[in-house]
Amino acid sequence: MAVDDLIREEDVPAVPAEEYASRHSDVRKLTERLCEPLCPEDCVIQSMPDTSPTRWHLAHVTWFFETFVLSKGLQGYTPFRADFSYLFNSYYNSIGQPFARPNRGLLSRPTMEEIFEYRRAVDQRMQEFLRESDLDRVAPLLPVVEIGLHHEQQHQELLLTDIKHVFSCNPLYPTYRERSTQASPEISPLSWSSNEGGIGWIGHEGSDFAFDNESPRHKVWLDPFLLANRLSTNEEYLRFIEDDGYARPELWLSAGWNQVCEQGWTSPLYWIKQDDGWSNFTLSGLRSMAPSEPVCHISFFEADAFARWSKARLPTEHEWESAAQNLKIQGKFVEESAFHPLPISDEADDRLSQMFGDVWEWTASDYSAYPGYQPLEGALGEYNGKFMCNQYVLRGGSCVTPKSHIRRTYRNFFPTESRWQFSGIRLAR
């Protein structure tokens, strides 16, 4: 596959390659800092097919830079290990058959030490490549480096969500990182922010980076709507549970009710009923449930049922983006190191709060292509487009998302039954 298959001429950025070298170093170091609380035994477990071992994340993001940058930009480049191209390919079928995802936890080798050696070797070559004097060779691959940086940020988030699921399966309830216990503050009842609707513009445009699924920018029609001023809380969701929310089929989509019956759902993932009330497993261990924290680890089905019980609905992604267009991207992201959604801190009756960070917000929009969507050419065209089936869109980022990774137009997507991600609820009417 030629370099030209990966990029378009208009995608070549004017940013100096040395700036990319600095950003590459920063992103790679953050990934490894997130691993510092872990021991090697933590990093090899795959607790369900949707998760991946920490070791696999560390290797896969390295494989991405080696496969899509170094092997294209350095003549005669020899891979660190030829078998890694099979073990750590995720789903890029056009460049070779990947190792089966559900079996990633069966690999006792390569060791963590070998994976870090792999990272160091590829990082060194990447720094040499990005700082070399032959700009004609480097510049065409900078858009791919940009994708690789955002790709690694996605895996920083997945690393944390996956290790939380791994730890939750351990009856010792291990702690990833200690967090001080804070009182759950009283918060005001939910209020509503109004939007008059009309013709709106949705999607990314401009020279700043965005994934291909965020484009092209296009017009949509929006009827007038209301959006909740904040995220729904644990306390509000508990009232849904206490009103037999999980036992009333009239509240659920048919496929959602099937999940409730087949999986035995009675509460969000990581909620644990104890003699003295509900507890919540977090990356800081098992803690008493804080009523004012945003409810999280909710499937689309649960979010939809809760909305119906609340005499409301979920917003469409177009409504969400329209409401967010003039808001600052500020909130509780991974940089705060809370690794858990926190209570609202900027309440105002008619102002939208918590639109970014804390939890990914389910929308009522299925994940599909925008009008005129064009995936990237070549293997990177598999990054987003081929997943536009049987998934729903989430917006806004979460407490384990890097702040520099999120945008107002960012479209996350997961299957309707997924619960291990930091996903929550904002109501609409």
Image (tube, helix red, strand yellow):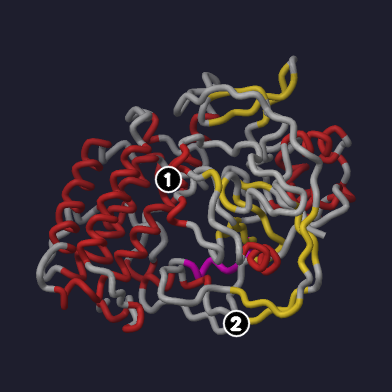
Identity of the amino acid at label 2? Pro
Is 181 placed above or below 130 here? above
Mark 2 vs mark 1: give the one in front: 2
Magenta highlight range:
384-391
Quarter of the image for residue 315 reads bottom right
Q: Nearer the viewer, residue 90 or 128?
A: 128
Decide whether the magenta segment is chiefly helix, strand or loop. Answer: loop
Residue beneath disc 2: 371
Q: For the N terminus, give its image quadrant.
A: bottom left
Q: Is residue 201 left or right of residue 428?
A: left
Q: Is residue 236 magenta?
A: no
At 76% from the left edge and 43% from the top edge, which residue is drawn? 260
* Whether residue 356 is visible: yes
Is 97 placed above or below 158 here? below
At 54% from the left edge and 29% from the top edge, which residue is drawn? 169
Q: Which mark is residue 93?
A: none
Distance in Å between CA atoms under marks 2 and 1: 37 Å
Q: How many marks?
A: 2
Quarter of the image for residue 65 reads bottom left
Callout 1 secondary element = helix
Residue beneath disc 1: 103
Which numbered disc flags the more N-terminal residue, 2 or 1?
Answer: 1
* Whether residue 255 is visible: no
Is 273 placed above or below 393 here? above
Q: Residue 12: x, y in percent?
A: 30, 77
Q: Residue 137: x, y in percent?
A: 16, 75
At 45% from the left edge and 39% from the top edge, which residue is drawn? 46
At 18% from the left edge and 70% from the top edge, which residue is drawn? 73
Identity of the amino acid at label 1? Asn
Q: Residue 85: x, y in percent?
A: 27, 57
Q: Is residue 327 left or right of residue 401?
A: right
Q: Is residue 386 magenta?
A: yes
